[in-house]
Image: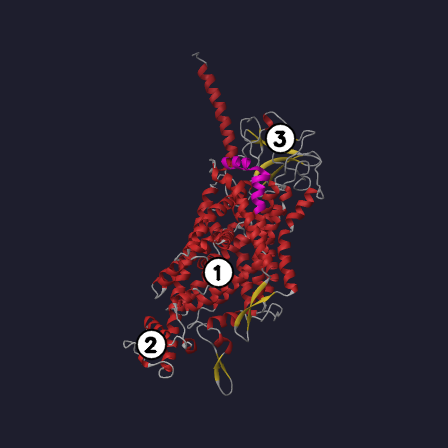
């Protein structure tokens, strides 16, 4: 080797080292995926301008996309959003109604076929494009940009009535600091001559009376407004204040709240389960719950209800999942997150079901004991007057009615029924079966505010358990509300660049004002209306379109390449066939069956009739039917409207000067668009070629050069750390990624 070869080698090494240092120093400045990038763009006058914009941003101001403080915080946010009130009061009801333990089989199958693939899809899209629902679907296909707006509308509708349920829980929470609990027994009415039990309460029960009369002060029908219920109005104001304060700083403030709001419900559920298992009769409830009725699994209705529950349990289509994942680092393993959150959701539902039926088993035993005592007294009264004393077994002592067990009572009834077969009905004796009590399926508010509250009145230290239960409901509701509100705010902020604080306060003020509709005396009926019609059908349509947009419009093969680049590995081929064929077909079947059910079932609601002290199913008046239809139409309308505006070029904001941006050796360089070349979709506005406007007046940023030109400069990077497809000069071997 020549003598000077070492010097040459040293010079080369120094050059390489300097080049690497130069590149790394630039990369380190942007190592955090959520920090800003410095871009050079062209304005319309053709004048170069350097500006600091957020990744995929559109204005010349300095801004940063917020980031989760930790992976745990992000997982808790997703769990808090997906695990909501439905896990506590909807899933146990469906489980009992649809075959007990057998219901878990179709639920798990559909969770794997529908839930996890779609949840993974939303996480991946949000994390890759790092925008809210409007920006994401606008970016995938401008003609499908209405999907994001539809998600926002549905989120707003749901937020309106969901926070009312939180306000109900707040009211019960505030009333739980009393011994005995105010719904423990019926109130007495005093007049000048006598004292008597409130007739409405006597005809129903103490907890039912307290719910309908003391809490809601409900009217007899939806047509009778009855004015505002001031107690619930104050609670609704408190609920919106809590949401506003938690969301005002975005994920920086709501993320910290998640540590409590997401974890506290699990503490309460476990405490309730341990306490309930120590109560008499809890095992009866759990045994009833998990006794499988396999024949019910063959019914199509069971599978439809399981699919619907999977769909809503994970919060698909709301935009909250996309919004939360958009604050993630680009290389986060969102597949692991999708599987983890989905199964946490499932096991939470099972845990809540165990708690609910352990408590209801305890309640059923108490109600059964009361039934036995009441009917034993009837038998004592009928002795010698319809029932012969010789029919009573000798070991049963009727002089002490309280000592007669359920087994003794059933033995007496069987003997009497066998001897007095023809006259038995006239005796008015009831069977007093624990199974009959457990078969009285209740869900929703009926479970939380009537059945469960009644069971808790029999707990030792009942105020403590009541406080814990309703605080848990408040936390479950808030966790879901944060995701729902994020599904509204993030897309709007990304699209219109509004200050988060102003938009959050404005959204909460408007929602509270409209929410006054739900705290008038007929408000409960409007909650039922919004729950039935504002979300189900629109969300199904939204998710079908999301699936089609990725699998067929954008292209499943391209999406898999993007996932490989983002995750560092190729996802299982299972997802390829799910997204392309199986899931869309299942969603269309579910959509069709839901549509058939809605059209074949006349719009109706369950009204509380004060004079009769019982519920009665009433049909909505004509104006109510119009409102029901309007809710569905308003939620879906953005999809065809945006499609039509794009398709017929009614929105046409062509730019006079186009530019692209590129990275080269760690520096961003400018490349003017060549004459005759089409521009690809802009990052934010997502227009089709030759149609993309500048995101802000005077500036135009495009994610990559059109695929029409050859050469190394035309190859795009796999989006580097940022996911916006800058042109990478001098790197022709890098694979293209259209996201």
Residue that lies at the very extreme toward the bottom in this rendered image: 193
What residue does disc 2 label? 402
- Mark 3 or mark 2: name the one nearer the start of the chain: 2
| Magenta part of the chain | 544-564
Q: CA distance from mark 1 to mark 3?
A: 52 Å
User: Which secondary structure is most common in the magenta stretch?
Assistant: helix
Q: Badge 2: few (under 14), some or many (20 or more) residues near its Cα, within 10 Å? A: some
Residue 524, located in which quarter of the rendered image?
bottom right
Residue 232 visible? The answer is yes
Image spot of residue 667 (x, y percent): 57, 31
Image spot of residue 79 (x, y percent): 47, 51
Q: Secondary structure at mark 1?
A: helix
Q: Secondary structure at mark 3?
A: loop
- Mark 2 or mark 1: name the one nearer the start of the chain: 2
What residue does disc 1 label? 474
Q: Are marks 2 and 1 in contact (CB under 8 Å)?
A: no
**What residue is drawn where x is 43% and y is 75%?**
425
Residue 630 is one of the magenta-drawn residues: no
- Mark 1 or mark 3: name the one nearer the start of the chain: 1
Image spot of residue 129 (x, y percent): 56, 41
Q: In the image, is residue 115 above or below residue 180?
A: above
Residue 548 is one of the magenta-drawn residues: yes
**What residue is drawn where x is 37% and y is 60%?**
287
What residue does disc 3 label? 707
Q: Depth-wise, is mark 2 or mark 1 nearer the camera?
A: 2
């Amino acid at each position: 080797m020549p003598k000077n070869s070492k010097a040459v080698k040293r010079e080369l090494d120094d050059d390489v080292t300097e080049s690497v240092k130069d590149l790394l120093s630039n990369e380190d400045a942007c190592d955090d995926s959520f920090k800003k990038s410095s871009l050079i763009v062209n304005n319309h006058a053709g004048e170069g301008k350097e500006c600091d914009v957020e990744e995929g941003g559109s204005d010349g101001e300095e801004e940063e996309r917020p980031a989760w403080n930790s992976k745990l915080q992000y997982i808790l946010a997703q769990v808090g959003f997906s695990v909501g009130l439905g896990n506590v009061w909807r899933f146990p009801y469906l489980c009992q109604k649809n075959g007990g333990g057998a219901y878990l089989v179709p639920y798990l199958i559909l969770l794997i076929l529908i839930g996890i693939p779609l949840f993974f899809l939303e996480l991946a899209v949000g994390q890759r494009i790092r925008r809210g629902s409007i920006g994401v679907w606008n970016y995938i296909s401008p003609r499908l940009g209405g999907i994001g707006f539809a998600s926002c509308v549905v989120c707003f509708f749901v937020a309106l009535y969901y926070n009312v349920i939180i306000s109900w829980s707040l009211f019960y929470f505030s009333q739980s600091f009393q011994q005995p609990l105010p719904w423990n027994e019926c109130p007495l009415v005093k007049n000048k001559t006598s004292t008597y039990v409130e007739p409405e309460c006597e005809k129903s029960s103490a907890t039912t009376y307290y719910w309908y009369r003391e809490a809601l002060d409900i009217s007899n029908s939806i047509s009778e407004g009855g004015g505002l219920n001031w107690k619930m109005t104050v609670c609704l104001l408190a609920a919106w204040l809590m949401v506003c304060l938690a969301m005002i700083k975005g994920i920086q403030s709501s993320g910290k709240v998640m540590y409590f709001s997401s974890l506290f419900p699990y503490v309460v559920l476990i405490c309730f389960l341990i306490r309930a298992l120590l109560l008499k009769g809890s095992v009866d409830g759990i045994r009833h719950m998990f006794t499988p009725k396999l024949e019910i699994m063959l019914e199509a209705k069971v599978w439809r209800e399981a699919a619907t529950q999977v769909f809503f349990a994970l919060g698909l289509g709301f935009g909250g999942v996309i919004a939360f994942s958009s604050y993630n680092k680009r290389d986060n393993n969102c597949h692991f997150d999708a599987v983890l959150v989905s199964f946490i959701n499932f096991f939470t539902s099972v845990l809540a079901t165990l708690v609910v039926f352990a408590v209801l088993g305890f309640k059923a035993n108490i109600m059964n004991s009361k039934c036995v005592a009441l009917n034993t007294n009837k038998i004592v009264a009928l002795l010698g007057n319809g029932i012969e004393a010789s029919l009573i077994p000798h070991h049963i002592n009727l002089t002490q009615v309280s000592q007669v067990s359920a087994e003794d009572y059933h033995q007496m009834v069987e003997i009497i029924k066998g001897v007095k077969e023809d006259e038995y009905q006239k005796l008015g004796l009831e069977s007093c079966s624990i199974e009959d009590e457990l078969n009285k399926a209740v869900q929703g508010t009926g479970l939380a505010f009537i059945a469960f509250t009644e069971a808790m009145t029999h707990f030792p230290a009942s105020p403590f358990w009541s406080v814990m239960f309703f605080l848990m409901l408040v936390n479950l509701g808030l966790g879901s509300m944060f995701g729902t509100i994020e599904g509204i705010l993030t897309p709007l902020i990304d699209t219109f660049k509004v200050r988060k604080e102003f938009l959050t306060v404005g959204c909460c003020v408007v929602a509270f004002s409209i929410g006054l509709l739900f705290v008038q005396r007929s408000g409960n009926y409007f909650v039922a209306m919004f729950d039935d019609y504002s979300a189900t059908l629109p969300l199904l349509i939204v998710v079908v379109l999301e699936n089609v947009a990725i699998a067929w419009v954008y292209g499943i093969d391209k999406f898999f390449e993007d996932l490989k680049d983002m995750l560092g590995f190729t996802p299982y081929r299972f997802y390829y066939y799910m997204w392309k064929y199986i899931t869309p077909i299942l969603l269309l079947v579910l959509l069709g069956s839901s549509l058939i059910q809605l059209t074949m079932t006349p719009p109706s609601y369950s009204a509380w009739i004060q004079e009769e002290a019982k519920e009665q199913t009433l049909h909505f008046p004509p104006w109510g039917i119009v409102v029901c239809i309007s809710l569905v139409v308003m939620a879906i309308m953005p999809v065809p409207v945006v499609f039509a505006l794009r398709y017929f070029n009614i929105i046409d904001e062509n730019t006079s000067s186009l530019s692209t941006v590129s990275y080269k050796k760690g520096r961003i360089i400018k490349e003017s668009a060549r004459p005759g070349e089409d521009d690809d979709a802009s990052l934010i506005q997502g227009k089709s070629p030759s149609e993309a406007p500048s995101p802000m007046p005077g500036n135009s940023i495009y994610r990559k050069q059109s695929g029409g030109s050859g050469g190394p400069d035309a190859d795009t990077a796999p989006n580097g750390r940022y996911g916006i497809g800058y042109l990478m000069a001098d790197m022709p071997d890098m694979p293209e990624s259209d996201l």
